Amino acid sequence: MKQNFLYSIIILFIVIFTITIDAQNKSNKYTIVIHGGAGGFSKNSPDSLKELYLNSLKEALKIGQDILKNGGTSLDAVEKVINYLEDNHLFNAGKGAVFTTDGRHELDASIMNGKDLSNGAVAGVTIIKNPISLARLVMEKTNNVLFAGRGADELGIKLGVEIVPNSYFHTDEQYLDFLKGSVKKYSGETVGCVAIDNYGNIVAGTSTGGRNYKIPGRIGDSPIIGAGNYADNNTCGVSATGIGELFIKHTVAYNVSALMKFKGYTLKQACEEMIYKVLPDNAGGIIAVDKDGNYEMVFNTTAMFRGVANSNGVFEVAIWK
């Protein structure tokens, strides 16, 4: 009897100690930023279309905000926000992805956890409904970072993610662009999300259908850790959108973090250095959150679909500067 009582006391002590430690580690502060691509979206677009984009950004932001304000993790928030954007035909990720020159869809995504620098990515997947979810499984369930093409699709089947026919990604709007048979100067709507949760953990994720009318097999920056995506709890998290080749060439996402780590830049200084001084005009943009919850949404294109919410009551979405 005494042994059972002593055992109960020990268990109670462990529970109280665990709760106390969790409370000490929890700050009740969070920040989440999202993007839906950067490019040349005209201010003269129909008001109805503008509202569709703005309402979609609000809905995506609310999904992430609800997770974070209720004590959820930045990892869950980033995945679920991007899932919503992948399922939304307005954006070039998942449903609504652009076409390759042979009339198919090839999708890319990556996710990175700033807590331990773990990351996962997929490129050129053709049957994965939500590539960001497979990227997370690559990070959590394998010893690898990046899977591509058929191998990535087969891994998705093995790991049990939702599988769809390639035609699922087709939308009439993107198909009309494909029928024109030429590459747009820039096709945006790549999606991304960066969040820091109540525990100070930063996660960044990016998902895309790539460039309009791209050659089959072409891969941009979105699944490349350090180029289109990066996160480190000691500095910041970054998700990029734009001309992928340029973001790869200049290792944009990592260099934002590096400027902060090695040069002592603020998040604002680092983001503006990369977008305004390193990249050429009309290259794209980035969203970022630092370890203190500060955020930036910087772009050198005409527009960038974007939004931010935090524990201080900020909740904003925008398209133009």
Image (cartoon, rainbow, N blue to C red):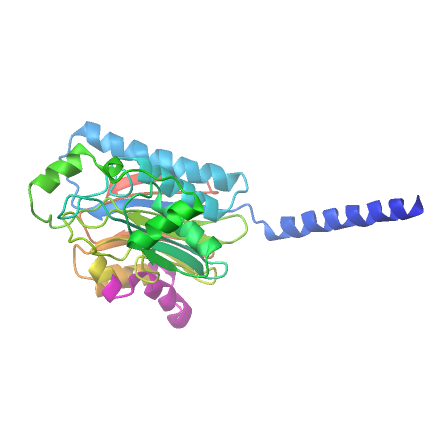
Q: Nearer the viewer, residue 187 or 57?
A: 187
Could you tell me which quadrant the N terminus lies in? top right
Residue in view at x 14 percent, y 47 percent: 102
Left or right of 279? Residue 23 is right
Residue in view at x 20 percent, y 34 percent: 171
Q: Is residue 228 above or below residue 189?
A: below
The answer, for residue 294, to whether it is visible in the render is no
> Where residue 192 sits: x, y (%)?
33, 48
Left or right of 243? Residue 156 is right
Left or right of 148? Residue 236 is right
**As drawn, which residue projects farthest toward the top?**
48
**As drawn, which residue projects farthest toward the bottom?**
262
> Where residue 91 sits: x, y (%)?
25, 40
Left or right of 114? Residue 299 is left
Q: Nearer the viewer, residue 158 or 234?
A: 158
> Where residue 52 sits: x, y (%)?
26, 31
Q: Nearer the viewer, residue 273 or 124?
A: 124
Q: Is residue 54 magenta?
A: no
Tally the numbered discs.
0
Could you tell me which quadrant the C terminus lies in? top left
The span shown in magenta is: 248-269
Quadrant housing residue 235: bottom left
Q: Nearer the viewer, residue 303 or 312?
A: 303
Secondary structure mostly seen in magenta is helix
